[in-house]
Amino acid sequence: MKEINYWEQFMATGKIEDFLAYKNAGRQEEREAMRESEEDSDAGGHGTYGDDFKG
């Protein structure tokens, strides 16, 4: 699948819609990175319980 370069698209067209797509794509990447880091931190299965016991 071809990745769209939203910045180049915006620079070529000058359309606000293309700029907003560029900004939105960056935010989506940030959300995905945060989600992945949260999943990695939960992967060990060792968490804290209400009584501060670490399992």
Image (cartoon, rainbow, N blue to C red):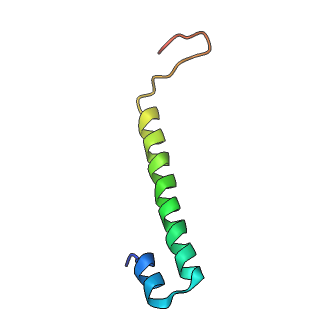
Quick check: 38 above or below 10?
A: above
Quick check: 8 above or below 39?
A: below
Toward the right, the furthest residue is 50
Residue 40 lies, in percent from the top left, at: 41, 39
Residue 51 lies, in percent from the top left, at: 60, 9
Residue 47 lies, in percent from the top left, at: 50, 22
Asked whether residue 53 appears in the rendered view, the answer is yes
Asked whether residue 1 appears in the rendered view, the answer is no
Residue at 51% x, 53% y is 31
Residue at 44% x, 89% y is 12
Residue at 50% x, 72% y is 22
Residue at 46% x, 33% y is 42
Q: Quadrant of the N terminus?
A: bottom left
Q: Is residue 6 left or right of residue 51?
A: left
Q: Nearer the viewer, residue 51 or 12?
A: 12
So how many labels did they put on this image? Answer: 0
Residue 35 lies, in percent from the top left, at: 49, 47
Q: Nearer the viewer, residue 32 or 5?
A: 5
